[in-house]
Image (spheres, coloured by chain):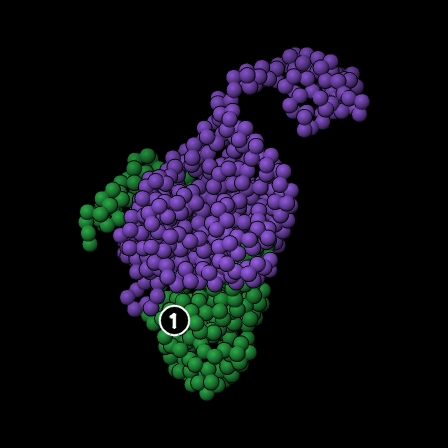
Amino acid sequence: MSAKKSDFRQRIAAGMADRRVIRAVHQATFHKVETVADALSLLRNHQELRDLAARIKQHTLENLPGYLEQFISACERNGTRVHFAADAAAAREIICEIARVSGSKLAVKSKSMTTEEIHLNEALEAAGVRTVETDLGEFIVQIDHDRPSHIVSPIIHKDRQQIARALVRETGCDYTEDPTELTAVARKHLRDVFRHCDLGITGVNFAVAETGTICICTNEGNGRMTTTRPRVHVALLGIEKLVPRLRDLPVFLKLLARSSTGQPLTVYTTLITGPKRPADPDGPEQVHVVLLDNGRSEILGGPFIEVLRCIRCGACLNACPVFRNIGGHAYGSVYPGPIGSLVTPLLSGIVAHAELPRASSLCGACRDACPVKLDIPGLLVKLRARTCNRQPLTKRMGMTIWKWIMRSPTMFGCVQRSMRWFLRPDRDGWISNGPGPAGEWTKVRDLPPPPKKSFHRRWREEWADED
Amino acid sequence: MKTNDGPKTGVTNDDARRDAVDAFVNSLKRRRHDAPAKTMLPEDIEIVTRLVERDEDPAALFTQTATTVGVNVHSATTADWLDVVAKLLQEHQAKDAAIPPVGDGFFEAERVEQLKQRLVADGVAAKSETDDETLFSVDMAITGVAAAIAETGTIACEARPIIARGSSLIPPVHIAVVAAEQLLPDLCDYFNVLSKRSELPADASLITGPSKTADIEGVLVTGVHGPATVHVVLVRES
């Protein structure tokens, strides 16, 4: 526990120390917040649209078994094969098996957080399937043996020099720092991969219960390429991604890109309903949907059900002052930022991630930015409550005493008066070196000295008899 | 089909696969997740969602929104659209272009034939093959669309027999020929149209601008995997 905690503290310190990265993250997130605000102001009624999106998702989650049944039978009608994976290991096993049975040797991946969650790439490589990320950011992450630091902009922490060096090493191209030229190098390299790949792996942004349609949103076209070029398409679908009807999609599509990057829609919004029809010249012959539970059904029945409304737009990361100042890697989890601090402990166990819900100032910027109206600060507090009996004994005892003092006006007054003796200001008039446990707190903060008279006393002396 | 492979995952055994899926849904039901919902499914969602009314002029709006997302919109009439397309090919100095043998929407078979003749006369090779060799080598593709959306500046390309998905995706330049009558005011309208179909296409792609990324230091670059340049020739009755 304490070792874990210090790991987390170390990652935060390391994140904050890298001024170059923090500057880049500040610049990118502030820019996004501005663009997103402009885009949302063009909506006729942003608040009502958020409310609608939240209600549709909440309704679907409360009735999930019925909608899953509907989705599964629609898929069977369309010729899409649906699999079930209880956890990450089962999902990896199913996807590797699909690769093996279809004789696939080269897999292309479209950007997908859910496949990151199950650590799919290593498993496919071990099964002898070369696996290539095709989103530009994720491709750079892969060839530079790095980790993504943002759920929408994975290389927000990298500068063009690092990207250039990675591409030179991987492709043998001439060194250039021009983003257009660097993108062209990646395009050329990945074209060859797209031409020869036999397996395509994607996540899913939304799945429509009534029609068995899956919706994939990308800007670069990696989603379209991955569902057009290979013979076999595997979509990994978190069970929370369902919406009831086709006509519900505009509600979410109008919010997703606007909240994420400020675009009216992502450049490519792809709606897949089954494998290619016999007369279609291209498209996959097989479409597999792997339904992933991996802890979601536990959340479904409990007080954190609304967390599953999340559509992974990344708006809460961009809005978060903590994320901006420590960067995505400090969180040490696949999903960083405010939503990650909720999702990670709920999916992968609160014991190992007890510090994450505390990595928030609860300022509420994430709640205001969320297109599906998740009360992230409220849920973080609820989650903190779950970890309180895991705190060290001294801290728990301290909190009990604290509670006792705070509930008794006499004790409170007594302690308040005694504070004046314990807390002595320095020459500058501030307390920067508190006694005992307060010392840790005042290391990074200054405390004003307690006033000579308490509020209670002033009230009695100055105003009380005016009534 | 081999039956003994992967009995655990049921990848090759359809019955085992379906059983695993059903068992999961049933376990969810047993856990009382299907208790009567507290949240009703909203019925009248368009009141809030719709941004563009049906009585607005979709052509003017489309020209504005598509231009904003980086599409080059060219105005044409049924009398001069061939000239407008031919001029675009000239500007790109295209040697060859992929054109599907039958078109979509306005770009119907007869007009495809007219365009091909025009291109041949201009010395451009018109290729109707949709094999990899063609799609990965041609200078551009010319297609019709299933619909276009004024609200967002979007063109909708749907997979159809003989029309390759790859033609609006793989070549570096995409010219879409759109009739003004194909314009829908709002994104909601496209999904209303889709909802009424008896069968959905295997792939329907809403394309809103050229392929884009801002992954490298937030600098906007076009043409990552899809076309770097998208032209829409918007054809009105002359």
Q: Identify the residue shown where x is 40% and y is 73%.
A: B134
Circle 1 is placed at which residue position?
B133
Q: Chain of mark 1?
A: B
Q: Is residue A38 above or below residue B209?
A: above
Q: Is residue A30 visible?
A: no
Q: Identify the residue shown where x is 59% and y is 53%.
A: A160
Q: Amino acid at mark 1?
A: Glu
SS of the residue under disc 1: helix
Which one is in front, A177 or A63? A177
Which one is in front, A22 or A363? A22
Q: Is residue A31 above or below residue B80?
A: above
Q: Residue B200 location in percent, x, y?
A: 35, 62
**Looking at the image, which residue sits at the far bottom?**
B121
Q: Quadrant of residue A179?
A: bottom right
Q: Quadrant of residue A286?
A: bottom left
Number of numbered tags placed on the structure image: 1
Horizontal placement of A399 versus A102: left or right? right
Q: Identify the residue shown where x is 33% and y is 35%.
A: B32
Badge 1 crowding class, 10 Å Cα cut-off, few under 14, some 14 to 19, many 20 or more, is few
Q: Residue A453 location in percent, x, y?
A: 76, 17
Give the letter of the green chain: B
Q: Identify the residue shown where x is 43% and y is 72%.
A: B137
- Location of the C terminus of chain A by quadrant is top right
Give the letter of the purple chain: A
Q: Is residue B208 above or below residue B96?
A: above
Q: Residue A152 location in percent, x, y?
A: 51, 49
Q: Residue B72 location in percent, x, y?
A: 55, 71
Q: Is residue B219 visible?
A: yes
Horizontal placement of A249 versus A199: left or right? right
